[in-house]
Image (cartoon, rainbow, N blue to C red):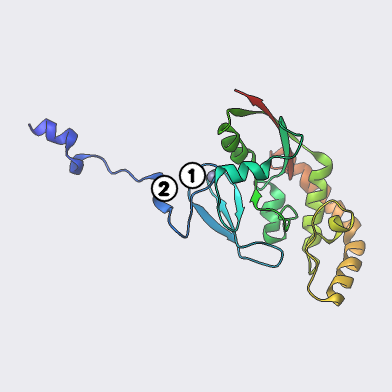
C-alpha cells in the first residue's frame, strides 16, 4: 500500500517545473518553438510594436507573436521553395547593434535564426540540409549596423542603395546630416565592419545566412 502511494500520490513525485512556466499574457509562446517570448527592444519609429525574442530558438518577433503559419509565410520568398536567406538574429551584428541592428527593417515582423527556421520548417516536413554564410550581404549588414551608431535615422546608406528599407530621421536637418555622416563614415565603418563580420562568420554568428531545405 505504501509503495503504491509513493508512486501514485502526487505529493511524493519529484517537483517538475514546466517549460512554459514563464508563459503568460506578457510572454506569449514563441511561434517556432513554444517557449515564452521576452522583451528585447521597445517600440520605436518604423516598427509595428515592441520587439520580443525567444531565448530558446532565438526568434525575434515585432508586435504580436502570431502563429507558426504566419512566421512561415513571412519566411518564404516567392520562387524559393528549397531555401531562404535570412538576416540572422543570432548574429554578432544583432548583438552589438541591438535597436540599431540593420537587420531590424521597418517591414520585418519576424527576425529569424537558423534554429528558429529549423523548428518552423519541421511543421511542413522539411529539414535544414545546409547553411552558408553570405559574405556580401553579411558585410553590408554589419557595415550598416556600424553606421547606424552614428546617424539619427536607421539604414540610411543601404536604403539609398536600395538594399534595405530605411527609417529616415524625423527632421529634415537630421536627414541631411545623416546623408553627410553616411558618406564621411562609410569607409571607416567598412574598415571596422569587414574584420568584425569575418570574425562573426568564423564563429557561426554571421549576419546573413542562406539555408537549404530538403523534404523529409
Ligand atoms: Zn523559440
Would residue 90 appear left or right of 157 to someone viewing this image?
left
Q: Is residue 144 above or below residue 178?
A: above
The structure residue drawn at horizontal position 39% and vertical position 50%, both measured from the top left corner, is: 21
Residue 208 spot, x, y in % from top left: 75, 43
Q: Quadrant of residue 183?
A: bottom right
Question: In the rendered image, which residue does mark 2 sit on?
Answer: 20
| Ligand 1 is within 8 Å of the C-beta of the residue at disc 2 | no
The structure residue drawn at horizontal position 79% and vertical position 44%, both measured from the top left corner, is: 138
- Look at the numbered disc 1 and give the secondary structure of its residue: loop
Residue 109 spot, x, y in % from top left: 65, 53
Is residue 210 in view? no
Given residues 69 and 131, the one toward you in this image is 69
Q: Quadrant of the C terminus?
A: top right
Is residue 82 in view? yes
Question: In the rendered image, which residue does mark 1 sit on?
Answer: 34
Residue 16 spot, x, y in % from top left: 31, 43
The structure residue drawn at horizontal position 71% and vertical position 64%, both measured from the top left corner, is: 46
Q: Disc number at residue 44?
A: none
Do callouts 2 and 1 mark residues in contact (Cβ within 8 Å)?
yes
Chain-order first, disc 2 or disc 1: 2
Q: How many marks?
A: 2
Residue 66 spot, x, y in % from top left: 56, 50
The structure residue drawn at horizontal position 55% and vertical position 53%, both measured from the top left corner, is: 65
Per the model, the C-alpha gap separating discs 2 and 1 is: 8 Å
Q: Is residue 50 above or below residue 140?
A: below
Instruction: Tell me which image quadrant ligand 1 sits in.
Output: top right
| Ligand 1 is within 8 Å of the C-beta of the residue at disc 1 | yes
- Look at the numbered disc 2 and give the secondary structure of its residue: helix
Given residues 10 and 193, the one toward you in this image is 10
Amino acid at each position: 500500500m505504501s509503495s503504491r502511494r509513493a508512486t501514485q500520490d502526487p505529493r511524493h513525485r519529484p517537483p517538475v517545473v514546466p517549460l512554459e512556466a514563464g508563459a503568460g499574457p506578457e510572454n506569449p509562446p514563441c511561434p517556432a518553438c513554444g517557449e515564452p517570448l521576452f522583451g528585447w527592444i521597445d517600440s520605436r519609429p518604423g516598427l509595428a510594436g515592441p520587439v520580443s525574442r525567444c531565448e530558446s530558438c532565438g526568434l525575434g518577433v515585432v508586435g504580436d507573436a502570431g502563429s507558426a503559419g504566419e512566421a512561415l509565410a513571412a519566411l518564404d520568398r516567392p520562387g524559393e521553395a528549397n531555401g531562404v536567406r535570412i538576416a540572422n538574429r543570432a548574429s554578432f551584428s544583432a548583438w552589438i547593434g541591438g535597436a540599431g541592428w540593420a537587420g531590424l527593417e521597418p517591414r520585418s515582423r519576424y527576425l529569424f535564426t537558423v534554429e528558429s527556421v529549423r523548428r518552423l520548417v519541421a511543421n511542413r516536413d522539411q529539414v535544414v540540409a545546409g547553411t552558408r554564410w553570405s559574405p556580401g550581404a553579411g558585410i553590408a549588414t554589419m557595415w550598416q549596423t556600424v553606421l547606424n551608431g552614428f546617424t539619427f535615422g536607421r539604414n540610411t546608406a543601404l536604403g539609398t542603395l536600395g538594399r534595405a528599407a530605411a527609417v529616415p530621421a524625423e527632421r529634415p536637418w537630421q536627414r541631411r546630416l545623416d546623408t553627410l555622416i553616411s558618406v564621411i563614415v562609410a569607409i571607416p565603418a567598412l574598415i571596422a565592419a569587414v574584420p568584425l563580420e569575418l570574425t562573426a562568420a568564423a564563429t557561426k554568428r554571421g549576419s546573413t545566412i542562406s539555408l537549404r531545405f530538403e523534404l523529409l
